[in-house]
Image (cartoon, rainbow, N blue to C red):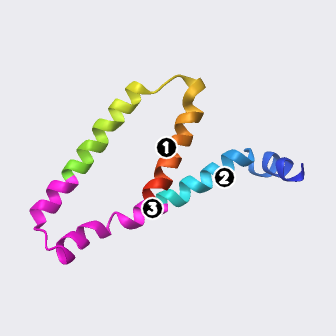
Amino acid sequence: MFIRDFFKKRVGVSRNVFALGIVSFFNDIASEMLYPVVPIFLTTTLGAPVAIVGLIEGIAESTASILKVVSGWFSPGPGHRRRNAGASFYDSAAQAF
């Protein structure tokens, strides 16, 4: 009971929200650390031309933008957001392996 009161009074959120924030923080750190290394890996190790790296980056950005629109359209009402948040964090963890 002490920990629950601590999070409510000191942090201002529940333990679950705090833990989800920590997981999201480390997931963002991991992806942001890898993102700048990919073009260097493609050009130096695999010998890909710079134009191909630009094409890959362009396809990745456009796919992300299109998926944002599509996922916003498919987003369910407030009752189902917890399930979707859990599935997205599970997916992020599974892609790490």
Residue at 41%, 26% in the rendered image: 74
Side of 77 relative to 13 (left or right): left
SS at mark 2 in the image? helix
Side of 53 relative to 87 (left or right): left
Badge 1: residue crowd in 10 Å (few <14, some 14–19, many ≥20): few
Residue at 28%, 67% in the rendered image: 38
Residue assigned mark 2: 19
SS at mark 1 in the image? helix
Q: What's the distance in space between the residues labelled 1 and 3, CA to CA?
A: 15 Å
- Which numbered disc covers residue 97? 3
Q: Earlier in the sequence, mark 2 or mark 3?
A: 2
Name the outermost residue toward the right. 1
The spot of residue 21 in percent (x, y) is 61, 51
Q: Earlier in the sequence, mark 2 or mark 1?
A: 2
Viewer-proximal residue among 94 and 37: 94
Badge 2: residue crowd in 10 Å (few <14, some 14–19, many ≥20): few
Residue assigned mark 1: 88
Residue at 54%, 60% in the rendered image: 26
Residue type marked 1 = Ser
Badge 3: residue crowd in 10 Å (few <14, some 14–19, many ≥20): few
Q: What's the distance in space between the residues labelled 2 and 1, CA to CA?
A: 15 Å
